[in-house]
Amino acid sequence: MPVFMEANPIHTIVFPAYKAHTFHRINVEYLAPLQAMRRDGIYKTLTKGIRTNLRKIGSEDDVVHSLRPQLENLASHLSLQTLQLVQARQHLHSNLEHLTQTPHPPLTHAASLESINFDQQLQAVETCLFEALYLNEQDYRAHFELGWLYLFLLGKLPEASAHFALASQQAQTADPQFAVFALRHLADTQYGLGHYSDAIETALQGLYQQAQPDLEQVYECARYLAIAGEHSQATQRLAKIVITSPVYYVQAQAEPDFAHNAEVTALLQDLRNLHLHKIQQQARLQWQSSKSAQFALPDRIDAQQIFKQISQQHLEVLDGLPYVTLSQRAQQISELMVLSSEQRILQTLQQRAQHYAQLAQHKRDKWQWINKIGGFCLHSASILLLASIMFYVMKSLLSAFGLGLLVGVDTFITWLFTGMFFLGCLGVVLFQFAPLGIKKLLRKQLELDNTYQLLQT
């Protein structure tokens, strides 16, 4: 099948009408080799498809950014599959060219595909594929390409189902892997026809033919089971893959086939709660080994209570985060909860130390006048001391020169010394006065500051 797709046909392939314009990976698995898509192109198509599905249910398409690692791995897988399909198709075309060396008008006419419109191109391709089957009825790849043409471009689902069935049967011996690929498309076609029981049977047949089936096959089977009313089996199969890859959790949220399935909805919610519980458990284990949890904090600060408060605040935020973030960032979130608790403890220590310092300063300011009186008394006592010394020196000099003593000088000096002693003692007492309770406040402040420095280091 030549590459001639236009923008509108590609959109109808990626978002087919028979699936309510919902994107699934199978929609691009054969489109990629037809369009010679590279890994980047496949990644962009996958991203666009999932984002469009999420927008239909009103979900934030930013979730897709969290799926980048998984989508890149998926794009690499599809790129490898694309390369294999391209090589197989080239081998098919080389065989056709070898078989059609004799004049065959349809194949000769197919060489001028570029000069005709899209409908004529489809007709020419259909004619070429019919001629390939005329030359070799066992050409399972020609059957597959014809079925794909009917399914995605011509909308002839019954004809597509018939050709996919023939392709899967004929490829069983020669190429079992391609037979499974054809069975998946057959089940997809039967789903589009509303033959849900047949789709389930075909999907299960493809699963049983592989020792390790692809997760996408299991997801497709779960869809068919759900739309057929087999909710329990659909939930069981879906649970196996959404735990393995968050891509399918996101897909299941936007899947129309699961929209009114209470069991699937409960499963998705249970998985979300499971990851929340896992984050809490990891945070508790990390918290128990942290220094803040083992250290006896002063001033009756309860580290466990602070951790519980921080955990509750984080859980309220986690309720609004997408499942992808919870599943991929569980370790980081738990570490953040512990780190936030430690920072809150340091903040509490610092705030209380500052609070006690402010209370102590307030008490000092309130009773500062007593200290000022004490200072004034000490200052007065020092003046009296100097005066006493001066009079004593003057008395000694007068005595040395044989002059008469001043009347009452000894009594005056005694009074000066007495006043100095009294004012000095009173000044010392008043100057050292500390308000009631200030020492306790300062002691608490010191304990809090020391603990803060210890935990910070």
Image (cartoon, rainbow, N blue to C red):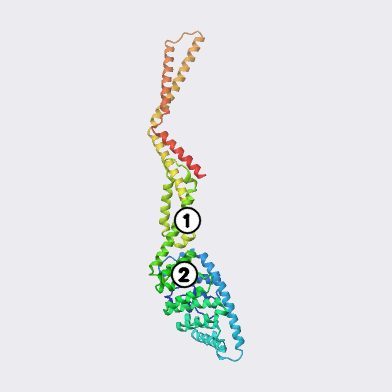
**Residue identifier under label 1:** 333
Residue closer to the observer: 400 or 1: 1
Please tell me how many numbered marks the rendered image carries: 2
Q: Residue at x 59, y 83 (%)?
A: 93
The answer to whether 405 is drawn above or below residue 441 in the figure is above
Query: Hey, what amino acid is under mark 1?
Result: Ile
Q: Position of residue 101 (x, y in %)?
A: 61, 89
Q: Position of residue 152 (x, y in %)?
A: 47, 80
Query: Hey, what amino acid is under mark 2?
Result: Ile
**Residue identifier under label 2:** 50
Q: Residue at x 56, y 79 (%)?
A: 173
Residue closer to the observer: 359 or 123: 123
Residue 80 position by quadrant: bottom right
Q: Give the mark nearest the N terminus, 1 or 2.
A: 2
Could you tell me if residue 54 is visible in this image? Answer: no
Q: Position of residue 368 (x, y in %)?
A: 39, 32
Mark 1 nearby-residue class (10 Å; few <14, some 14–19, many ≥20): some
Mark 2 nearby-residue class (10 Å; few <14, some 14–19, many ≥20): many
